Image (cartoon, grey):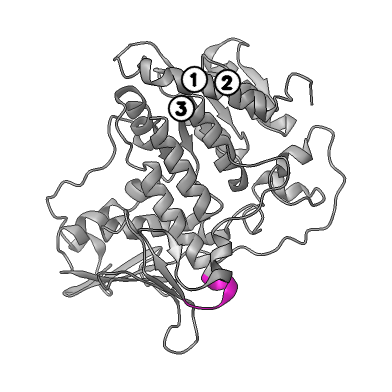
């Protein structure tokens, strides 16, 4: 790593403090309705990151000026994408995210690193006045999600979570259920993968273009394995929450929004016992139950006081769509356009960090119930596990030195 890339936390936070002091007196150009481009950078340029980067490059109001990754070939591919789009070689490629965040010309950042890095990079970006689009799951722990939400509010930044499927894939369910097609909704089933586990991959020599210590960052140290830098980190607890948080942020996010529970949380989480509770069960204060697995309709299934969706034995097309309007994306261009619109207007996006955090928390609590194999009582207002100190310890994780949330 170059000397320049080693920006200390003290120096970095000093710069953030200067920005914080000035913030109340400076109105962002986007909020003033300026017609200039939104200057962006991408941090975490693996497969998903480059996919998101390509989406942002498709908007004429965006100018991408920097990309960042601790894997050299990922940096090179991302830089090449940007340079080919603009027909020049101006895009800067960085190994350390703090070099990117220190640039005052950058308005917004795309964060698509592995999950264990999201909270640190996002909070530091917010403190330096950047708006944030962060891939799901936005957090590795419940406490990280709440911290990101608080920092976004404190610094007045736009923060969009990255689950496009909640609206784009599942809005038929939203409209049907909220429109009363099955009466009052009482149950939902979400068919996604299970919890993450400990990582026991064999050691492999680290390639010369990989900064492995930086890839691990706040996670416990372990030897390099190539699958971890190519999307294979999700099954492992140190870096992600498994299928429960990966597709869970899509699936549970869709179920929560359909049931109008996306701004709260369950009051009890019951692990499967092979008897009365064949699936992990979330119980909400209004009596609605959401189950992990066991559905019949693909990823999502719903049951209400007057029927089921999808209706078993019937074609989906035979069910008329209610003529109702549900708040969703602003602007044009899907979830990416929604974010860009809100960067300009300073409105909160469809997947605002508070809602994204609630969805991720839903998945995190399910994982804790699985890992400990016992019921959890949850206070969704205080965001506390009630009467279980051991389970409460899983609401956050220690970070490897010198990393910590700002």
Query: Alpha-carbon distance for marks 1 and 3?
Result: 26 Å
Between 331 and 267, the one lying in front of the other is: 267
Q: Is residue 136 above or below residue 346?
A: below
According to the picture, the residue beneath numbered tag 2 turns out to be: 15
Residue at the extreme bottom: 275
| Mark 3 secondary-structure assignment | helix
Earlier in the chain: of badge 1 and badge 3, it is 1
Look at 44% across and 17% down and name the residue there.
Answer: 22
**Residue at label 1?**
19
Q: CA distance from mark 2 to mark 3?
A: 28 Å
Q: Quadrant of residue 371?
A: bottom right
Q: Position of residue 109 (x, y in %)?
A: 51, 28
- Was residue 374 drawn as part of the magenta stretch in this picture? yes
Mark 3 sits on what residue?
56
Q: Which mark is residue 40?
A: none
Q: Position of residue 177 (x, y in %)?
A: 21, 61
Q: Is residue 164 left or right of residue 240?
A: left
* Disc with the residue nearer the chain's start (2 vs 3): 2
Answer yes or no: is residue 286 visible.
yes
Crowd tier of the residue under label 2, counting other residues whose Cα lies within 10 Å: few below 14, some 14–19, many 20 or above: some
Query: Which quarter of the rendered picture does the C terminus lie within?
Result: top right
Residue 252 coordinates in the image, percent (x, y): 40, 59
When the figure is inspected, residue 356 is found, relative to residue 122, above or below; the finding is below
In the image, 194: left or right of 210?
A: left
Q: CA distance from mark 2 to mark 1?
A: 6 Å
At mark 1, the secondary structure is: helix
Q: Position of residue 283 (x, y in %)?
A: 35, 72
């Amino acid at each position: 790593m170059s000397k320049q890339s080693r920006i200390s936390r003290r120096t970095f936070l000093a710069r953030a403090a200067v920005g914080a002091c000035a913030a109340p007196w400076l109105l962002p150009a986007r909020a003033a309705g300026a017609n200039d481009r939104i200057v962006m950078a991408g941090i975490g340029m693996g497969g998903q990151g480059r996919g998101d980067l390509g989406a942002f490059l498709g908007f004429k109001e965006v100018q991408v000026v920097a990309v960042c990754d601790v894997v050299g070939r990922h940096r090179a591919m991302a830089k090449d994408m940007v340079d080919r789009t603009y027909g020049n070689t101006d895009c800067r490629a960085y190994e350390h995210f703090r070099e990117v965040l220190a640039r005052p010309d950058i308005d917004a950042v795309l964060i698509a690193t592995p999950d264990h890095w999201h909270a640190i990079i996002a909070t530091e970006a917010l403190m330096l006045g950047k708006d944030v689009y962060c891939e799901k799951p936005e957090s590795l722990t419940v406490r990280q999600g709440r911290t990101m939400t608080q920092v976004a509010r404190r610094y007045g930044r736009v923060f969009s979570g990255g689950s496009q499927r909640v609206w784009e894939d599942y809005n038929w369910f939203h409209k049907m259920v909220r429109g009363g097609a099955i009466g009052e909704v009482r149950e939902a089933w979400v068919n996604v993968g299970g919890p993450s586990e400990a990582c026991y991959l064999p050691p492999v020599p680290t390639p010369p273009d990989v900064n492995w210590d930086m890839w691990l960052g706040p996670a416990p140290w372990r030897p390099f394995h190539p699958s971890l830098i190519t999307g294979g980190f999700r099954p492992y607890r140190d870096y992600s929450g498994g299928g429960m948080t990966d597709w869970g942020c899509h699936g549970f996010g869709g179920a929560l929004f359909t049931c109008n529970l996306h701004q709260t949380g369950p009051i009890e989480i019951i692990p499967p016992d092979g008897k009365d509770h064949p699936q992990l069960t979330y119980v909400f204060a209004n009596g609605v139950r959401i189950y992990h697995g066991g559905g019949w309709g693909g990823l999502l299934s719903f049951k209400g006081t007057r029927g089921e969706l999808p209706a078993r034995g019937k074609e989906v097309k035979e069910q008329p769509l209610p003529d109702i309007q549900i708040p969703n994306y602003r602007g044009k261009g899907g979830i990416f356009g929604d974010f860009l619109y809100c960067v300009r207007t300073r409105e909160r996006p469809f997947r605002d960090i508070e809602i994204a955090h609630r969805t991720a928390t839903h998945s995190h609590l399910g994982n804790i119930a699985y890992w400990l194999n016992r019921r959890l009582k949850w206070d969704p207002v205080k965001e506390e596990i009630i009467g279980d100190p051991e389970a409460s310890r899983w609401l956050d994780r220690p970070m490897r030195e010198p990393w910590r949330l700002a």
